[in-house]
Amino acid sequence: MRFHAQVDVTHRPGIADPQGATVERALPALGWTNVSKVAVAKSIRLVIDAADEVEARSQIDDMCRRFLTNPVLESFTVTISELTPSGADA
Amino acid sequence: MRFHAQVDVTHRPGIADPQGATVERALPALGWTNVSKVAVAKSIRLVIDAADEVEARSQIDDMCRRFLTNPVLESFTVTISELTPSGADA
């Protein structure tokens, strides 16, 4: 079975987010004064072949911890959806 | 009213994604041979004060087109949810 996965990688609480802070500081100068708590993060999309969703999720967790994210600085959430055969090449 | 918004910024079709391509090339060497179509993108989270959800979405679309994204290279999707008063400081 083939699954589509989206991994949202965010900074752990307390970890500096200079890109988000810079965006937030710039917004009032552009006329938008009603925006706060800006955070800029990373997202990873991929397609994975696995026997079932549990196996896919387990492998993605492993990939995130060992390779895709820095677990000291970042946390991640994984969203998985099954690709239908007609959507396999989408 | 206060809203939480998540903006997912992705590459437009045909635009090179070197970070995603590099991750995809590295995965087999680490033992993961069943992953394809890796794409690395950006996500922006923010809190916005607006009269209603329509106004919030309109302003965020404007911010994305003029400041947060490069419309030539990137497309974006916006997800908005209302913050309850108890969750306003979350």
Image: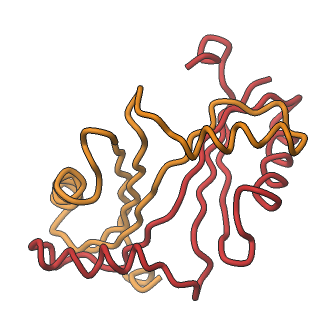
Chain colours: A red, B orange
B48 on left or right of B5: left
Q: Quadrant of residue A65?
A: bottom right
Which residue reaches farthest top?
Answer: A86
Where A82 sits versus B77, above or below? above
B40 on left or right of B47: right
Quadrant containing the N terminus of chain A is top right
Q: Quadrant of residue B34?
A: top right
Where B44 sits versus B65, above or below? below
Residue B30: % across, % down:
87, 45
Residue B70: % across, % down:
27, 48
- Residue drawn at 22 percent across, 74 percent down: B49
Where B86 sits versus B57, above or below? below
Quadrant containing the C terminus of chain A is top right
Report the front residue among A74 and B21: B21
Report the front residue among B31 and A61: B31
- Residue drawn at 9 percent across, 73 percent down: A31
Report the front residue among B19 and A11: B19
B80 on left or right of B18: left
- Residue drawn at 58 percent across, 84 percent down: A15
Residue A8: % across, % down:
59, 57
Residue A86: % across, % down:
61, 11
Total labels drawn: 0
Q: Quadrant of residue A83?
A: top right
B63 on left or right of B47: left
